[in-house]
Image: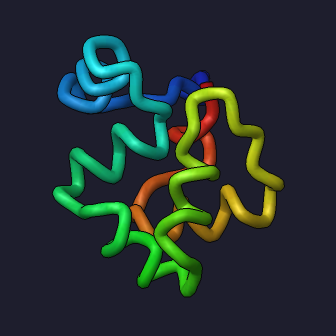
Amino acid sequence: MRVADDSVQFPHEVVGYQLEQGLSLIGAWRKYRRLTQADLATRLGISQPALAQIEKPDAKPQPKTLARVARALGVSVAQLRE
């Protein structure tokens, strides 16, 4: 019998950015993908200040927003949740 693996995986660098620099998972993934806030904001069709608000470690983006960010970063929504 095969057991489903529901674990979410993160590159070591993403975890390092989050722990060492205090970035949110969105910020850590953005940095891992070598994107600036302006780059990601452009991909999302929003302003850089709006992205900065979404990236705050204590931010709670709406599910729809989180899905858009995940697509723009090429990751799953689960990889953006803590």
Answer whether residue 49 is visible to the viewer in this image.
yes
Give the camera-side residue of 7 and 15.
Answer: 15
Q: State the image coordinates of residue 62 (x, y, percent, origin top left).
A: 82, 54
* Residue at position x 46%, y 74% in the image: 41
Say if 8 sits above or below 50 in the image. above
Q: State the image coordinates of residue 60 (x, y, percent, origin top left).
A: 76, 39
Answer whether residue 2 is visible to the viewer in this image.
no
Give the camera-side residue of 20 and 8.
Answer: 20
Screen quadrant of the N terminus: top right
Report whether 59 appears left or right of 1: right
* Residue at position x 54%, y 77% in the image: 47
Say if 43 sits above or below 65 in the image. below
Screen quadrant of the C terminus: top right
Q: State the image coordinates of residue 48 (x, y, percent, origin top left).
A: 47, 69
* Residue at position x 55%, y 86% in the image: 45
Q: State the image coordinates of residue 9 (x, y, percent, origin top left).
A: 40, 29
Report whether 37 appears left or right of 72: left
* Residue at position x 24%, y 62% in the image: 35
